Amino acid sequence: MTLAFPKFHRNSRALVKRYLTPALYERLALLKTETGFTLDAAIQSGLKNQDSHIGIYAGDAHAYSLFSEILNPIIHEYHAVKETFAHDPGLDQTHLPPLDPDKAFILSSRVRVARNIKGFSFPCHITAGNRNLVESLVSDAIKKIPQDLAGSYLGFKRIPPCEIQDLLTKKQVFPAGDRFQDAAGINRDFPDARGIFTSRDKKFMIWVNEEDHLRIISMESSSDISGVFNRLCRGLDYLSTCLEFAWDKKQGFLTSCPTNIGTAMRAGVHIRLEKLEKNPNILNQLVNQNHLQIRGTSGEKTTVDGAIFDISNTQRLGISGTRIIQNLHTGVAEIIAAEKKL
Ligand code: CIR
């Protein structure tokens, strides 16, 4: 049996389109992972969204080895790593001074990591029953979280529909995923088994069953990126004692989107740059040379409003979490210096 080679949109610049040759497709198309995930399922998002950058999601940990011939070139290009690399998990606390103590530019700092629980399919391929089980495992784990991180879990299914909009505005609920995630199957059964754990001080959160089983987030309205990172490390240290995460010694933590593997960490600031907004060449140069990226004010694939940029790391693989924080600190310090000079 052969399957027809998939047709990507003629304008698509997705990495999956670039690397998926007919010969490679023929080798991989009939394979199934241990949980029954296929290449056709993996590339749905890229096929249905002609503006995809990557266009492929992993349905389980096994997909990373079974479909390595298509995933590895994408991973190497996105993460700018060579063929052979070793994941560096380093999560040593940092003690860098706040970047903007007068709060002239930085509105907030945020660090998140993605994690998936070993033995379960990832969100684009998980069954409804196993998604519920993931939610129970996380709810149990957080019962004994250290006191300074303690808080409460809000399962979205319990929220009356009339309250959802208000909670979305307050960012106490995450919405169903975007059209990229939707095409991949990540939004199935939303809002079942989705929820957010929030610490009492609202600086530590765990999103359950969004793009990954867990999105562990530390954030605050300050420029103390070190403090934010150190809080995340404490939460992660605890969670790692009660949950076993999908992990590979070369590729690090395994996630739905291949752009997140490795540390699975995104560390960034929301920063107001009124002068650099009018000088995009200077800003883009500083961002690129510091391995950072700009996202819109409300996150990925959104616009920049009121000169508020979301600036975060691009590298997640082959680099330690601690190094990511140090690089972000250096890069953002340079950006603030340039803004002050203009
Ligand atoms: C895409 O392929 O464009 C989406 N699945 C998002 C990929 C990850 N984000 C990114 O490159 N900034």
Image (cartoon, rainbow, N blue to C red):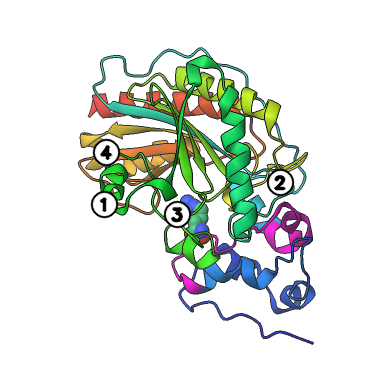
Q: Nearer the viewer, mark 4 or mark 2?
A: 4
Q: Earlier in the sequence, mark 4 or mark 2?
A: 2
Which residue, given by chain and number where applicable, does mark 1 sit on?
Answer: 162
Residue at point 38% right, 52% down?
A: 175
Q: Earlier in the sequence, mark 3 or mark 2?
A: 2
Crowd around label 3: few <14 · some 14–19 · many ≥20 (10 Å):
some
Number of residue marks: 4
Instruction: In the rendered structure, find residue 308 and report the number of the disc placed on it.
Output: 4
In this orientation, which residue lies closer to the viewer: 195 or 338? Answer: 195
In this orientation, which residue lies closer to the viewer: 326 or 57? Answer: 57
Q: Quadrant of residue 143?
A: top right
Q: CA distance from mark 3 to mark 1?
A: 14 Å
Q: Quadrant of residue 6?
A: bottom right
- Above or below, comparing residue 276 to residue 332 in the picture: below
Q: Amino acid at mark 2?
A: Lys
Crowd around label 2: few <14 · some 14–19 · many ≥20 (10 Å):
few
Q: Amino acid at mark 1?
A: Cys
CB atoms of marks 4 and 2 within 8 Å: no
In this orientation, which residue lies closer to the viewer: 252 or 185? Answer: 185
Q: Return the x and y of residue 155 as percentages of the image width and height.
A: 46, 43
Which residue, given by chain and number where applicable, does mark 3 sit on?
Answer: 191
Q: Quadrant of residue 109?
A: top left
Q: Earlier in the sequence, mark 1 or mark 2?
A: 2
Instruction: In the rendered structure, find residue 82 and report the number of the disc placed on it.
Output: 2
Q: Nearer the viewer, mark 1 or mark 2?
A: 1
Q: Earlier in the sequence, mark 4 or mark 3?
A: 3
User: What's the magenta region?
Assistant: 48-71
User: In which quadrant is the N terminus drawn?
Assistant: bottom right
